[in-house]
Amino acid sequence: MPYANPKAPKGGTLSLDARGTFNAANKWMTTGVAMVGTDYLYDTLMTGSLNEAFTMYPQLATKVTYDPDDTSWIIYHINPAARFWDGTPVTSSDVKATYDALLNKVRCIFAAIWVILKY
């Protein structure tokens, strides 16, 4: 992104303030309250731009293949350099497992979004 510094230092501490309490770091859990800032813990296949509304760019993906005339399918090409915190590669099986977990184990407000998707 043009506003990002590719030479920015890595590491450090993110400190956020919030009112209230939490009992988990997983924002997708079905019970309890997730802590503020958990969105910063996870990368996604695509991410939005801070200066372009409704524009998505590959994050864990390198590119996307789709047919604008047939929106029933999409192919995400996973970046071979995409890794988990422990260095293991992100695979299509990981993406499917995440999708399955979101479809079957998320809060009801999120589940309504997922039921319109087919795989």
Image (cartoon, helix red, strand yellow):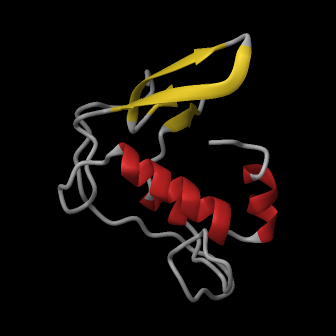
Q: Nearer the viewer, residue 75 or 45?
A: 75
Q: Is residue 67 visible?
A: yes
Residue located 57% across and 89% down the image? 23
Residue 108 at x, y percent in the picture = 79, 69
Q: Quadrant of residue 52?
A: top right
Provide residue 57's location: percent of width, then percent of height.
51, 27
- Residue under the image location 72 percent in, 52 percent down: 114
Q: Position of residue 21 (x, y in %)?
A: 64, 88
Check the image and report above or below for 50 versus 39: above
76 is higher (above) or lower (below) than 24: above
| Residue at the left extreme of this rendering | 87
Q: Is residue 2 left or right of residue 30?
A: left
Q: Dividing the image into 4 quarters, which one contains the N terminus?
A: top left
Q: Is residue 107 left or right of residue 65?
A: right
Closest to the observer, 81 or 94 = 94
Examine the image and state in which quarter residue 5 appears. Answer: top left
7 sits to left or right of 74: left
Quadrant of the snapshot with the C terminus: top right
Number of callouts: 0
Q: Write the residue at 20% across / 55% down.
A: 88
Query: Residue, x 53% and y 37% (percent of image)?
Result: 47
Residue 51 seen = no
> Residue 29: image x %, image y %?
61, 76
Quadrant housing residue 33: bottom right
